[in-house]
């Protein structure tokens, strides 16, 4: 605006004075027209240096603009006190503690299905029935033969007691009777196999056959899973061997039930470490009365093994791992940082030998323009951290409560970089 004002004011002055002077000397129309053209060109030529001087910013404005452009926008979060826990996190697929495939022990046509997928069953419950006509006839045949041999043995025994039958003949009939009794038991057992029963208690997770199918011996008919409890097996690195133990609380989350966390415990820990992977097996147990958890679900597990209360913490996003050190960038006032640097320089000068200080003063050139002090600067600070969770870490050394650390934009700053502070989400 200041440049435009200078331009308008000076143009009016040049144009008016030119017209006034030459108008009195050239009163004719043609002369006045040439005069107006001459005055306009003269005013424009004289305005160029004036415009340049009016639009040129001052030194202070330049410095302020340069400082603003050089500042890196960053997001900061203050050190805060909170409770933080040490935990191990992993993923695993849920699996039933016990599962079984129900297979046929005898061949035959499937006549009836008594359960369906999703039904809760108990051990010994009849699930399906096969055609029992042939096994039933075999049992009747075996039973008839058994009754005949029982009568034969009774008569043989009477004759043997009266010395009318030899020992060998009596023993033969007795052995035949025992063989037939076993045949009858086998026929009775095969008849019972026509009723397909559940070997374990659980839920019918899969029905494999349909009514009317001819079932072969050992053919699978159903899959039964016992969801109470469900197990999740973690392969944990060897370094966690001394931090986990049986009965520790485990929290489970699955994507399909995001609104609920399920609590369980460590059921058992393998006593050996797998040499190939460097891990050991940790089996976790979960009991869900709501029946929302299902076998095969993929879950994220967290085992909390220690907790610290009311300790200073910072977001994990603020940490920088470099050169074997853990560090953060802290935001400081530019004036405070400059004062600290000046004190450091004075201390170094005081410690230097006198002759070196004199030589330095002689070699010093003329004073240069001092750059403006930025409002905020980033300072690198080495820290020592303790327990940490997914979002925060405990600070043991290097920071004080109230210090503000850079969480967003830290990759774009270095020690002493001017920054523009944006308050982050805590």
Image: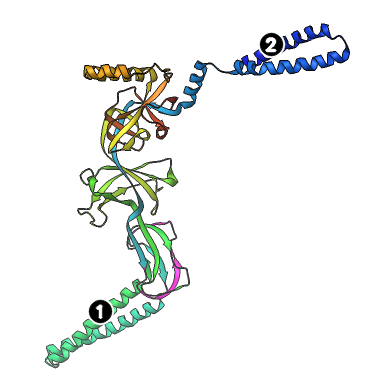
Side of 239 relative to 370 (left or right) = left
The residue wearing badge 1 is 182
Label 2 and label 1: CA atoms lie apart by: 129 Å
Q: Residue at x 43, y 46 (%)?
A: 255
Q: From this view, report whether residue 379 is shown above or below residue 150.
A: above
Between 116 and 224, the residue placed more toward the observer is 224
The residue wearing badge 2 is 9
Between 96 and 272, the residue placed more toward the observer is 272
| Residue 154 appears anywhere in the view | no
* Range of residues picked out in magenta: 103-122
Crowdedness near tag 2: few (<14), some (14–19) or many (≥20) residues, C-alpha within 10 Å: few
Q: Are marks 2 and 1 in contact (CB under 8 Å)?
A: no
Query: Colour mode?
Result: rainbow
Q: Quadrant of the C terminus?
A: top left
Q: From this view, report whether residue 361 is shown above or below residue 381.
A: above
Secondary structure category for the residue under label 1: helix
Image coordinates for residue 176, horizontal then vertical, percent: 22, 86
Image coordinates for residue 300, horizontal then vertical, percent: 36, 46
Secondary structure category for the residue under label 2: helix
Q: Quadrant of residue 337?
A: top left
Q: Quadrant of residue 395?
A: top left
Image coordinates for residue 224, horizontal then vertical, percent: 37, 60
Q: Quadrant of residue 164?
A: bottom left
Between 318 and 254, the residue placed more toward the observer is 318
Q: Is residue 111 magenta?
A: yes
Between 12 and 290, the residue placed more toward the observer is 12
């Amino acid at each position: 605006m200041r440049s435009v004002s200078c331009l308008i004011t000076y143009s009016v002055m040049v144009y008016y004075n030119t017209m006034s002077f030459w108008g009195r000397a050239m009163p004719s129309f043609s002369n006045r027209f040439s005069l107006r053209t001459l005055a306009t060109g003269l005013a424009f030529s004289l305005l160029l240096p004036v415009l340049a001087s009016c639009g040129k910013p001052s030194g202070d404005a330049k410095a302020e603009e340069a400082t603003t452009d050089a500042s890196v926008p960053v997001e900061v979060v203050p050190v805060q006190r909170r409770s933080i826990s040490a935990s191990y996190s992993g993923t695993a697929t849920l699996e039933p503690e016990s599962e079984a495939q129900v297979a046929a022990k005898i061949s035959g046509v499937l006549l009836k299905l008594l359960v369906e997928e999703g039904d809760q069953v108990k051990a010994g419950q009849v699930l399906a029935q096969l055609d029992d006509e042939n096994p039933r006839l075999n049992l009747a045949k075996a039973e008839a033969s058994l009754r005949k041999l029982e009568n034969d043995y009774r008569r043989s025994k009477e004759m043997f007691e009266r010395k009318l039958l030899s020992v060998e003949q009596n023993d033969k009939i007795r052995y035949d009777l025992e063989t037939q009794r076993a045949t009858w038991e086998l026929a009775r057992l095969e008849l019972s196999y026509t009723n397909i029963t559940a070997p374990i208690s659980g839920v019918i997770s899969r029905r494999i056959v349909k009514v009317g199918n001819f079932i072969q011996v050992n053919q699978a008919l159903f899959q039964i899973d016992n969801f109470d409890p469900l197990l999740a097996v973690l392969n944990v690195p060897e370094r966690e061997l001394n931090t986990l133990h049986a009965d520790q609380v485990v929290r489970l989350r699955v994507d399909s039930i995001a609104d609920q966390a399920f609590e369980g415990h460590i059921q058992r820990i393998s006593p050996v470490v797998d040499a190939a992977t460097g891990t050991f097996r940790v089996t976790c147990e979960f009991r869900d009365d709501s029946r929302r958890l299902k076998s095969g679900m993929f879950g994220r597990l967290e085992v909390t093994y220690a907790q610290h209360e009311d300790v200073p913490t910072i977001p994990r996003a603020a940490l920088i791992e470099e050169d074997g050190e853990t560090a953060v960038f802290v935001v400081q006032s530019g004036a405070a940082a400059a004062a600290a640097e000046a004190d450091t320089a004075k201390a170094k000068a005081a410690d230097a030998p006198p002759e070196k200080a004199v030589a330095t003063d002689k070699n010093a050139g003329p004073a240069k323009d001092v750059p403006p002090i930025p409002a905020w600067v980033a300072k690198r600070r080495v820290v020592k951290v303790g327990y940490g969770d997914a979002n925060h870490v405990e600070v043991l050394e290097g920071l004080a409560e109230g210090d503000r650390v850079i969480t967003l934009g830290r990759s774009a700053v270095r020690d002493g970089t001017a920054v523009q502070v944006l308050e982050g989400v805590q």
